[in-house]
Amino acid sequence: MLAPQDSNPSGRRRPRLATDTMAEGAEQQLRTKVRRLGAWQVAGDLPASFRYAAQGLIYGFASQRNFRIHVVMGAVVFALGLWLQLPTAQLAVLVLTVAAVLVLELLNTATEAVVDLAIGRRFHPLARIAKDCAAAAVLVAALSSIVIAALLLVPPLLARLSG
């Protein structure tokens, strides 16, 4: 894409390309390093990244009732799978299923926080859609995880209880 004409030292004009503008922007970013403070601070090292992630988990567990319910139910399901001596592959499916529900619950929490930050206490139909869709994603995952747990746990549970 052509940008406005620039002149060079020889006096001849050449078309300015969009890549020139992008390169200048990248140089500008390299030249100016902005220290970000508070919530905008970027993790400088790997341990800091893990600390921020742990803070998110702690916040989710402390503030979200449904997250706590999912954690407890996931632990119960996993313990039941161990007690039933499920094969490793089936235990892995249970772990992945529970992890998917927990991840979606955290994303739902993050979505709600960002929407609240963006619009405050005002009502907006798009905010409602964003929140409802994020909650629906958790619901679909939770219902699917119940079906998967039933398929994997009920047959060996019935066999153990009847025999």
Image (cartoon, helix red, strand yellow):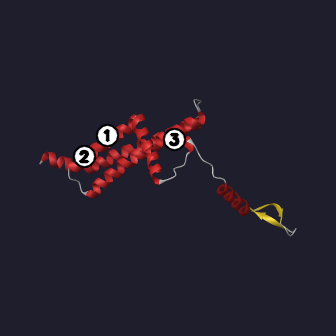
**Which residue ends up furthest to the right in the rendered image?**
11
Residue linked to disc 3: 111
Q: Which amino acid does label 1 sit on?
A: Val
Residue sitting at x 73%, y 59%: 21
Could you tell me residue 73's position as x and y percent?
Answer: 31, 41
Mark closer to the chain start, 3 or 2: 2
Q: Can residue 105 be seen in this view?
A: no
Could you tell me residue 41's position as x and y percent?
Answer: 55, 46
Mark 3 vs 2: CB contact within 8 A: no
Q: Which amino acid does label 3 sit on?
A: Thr
On residue 72, the disc is 1
Within-10-Å neighbours for mark 2: few <14, some 14–19, many 20+:
few
Residue linked to disc 2: 79
| Mark 3 → mark 1, Cα distance in angstroms | 23 Å
Residue 35 versus residue 120: which sits nearer the camera?
A: 35
Q: How many discs mark residues in the rendered view? A: 3
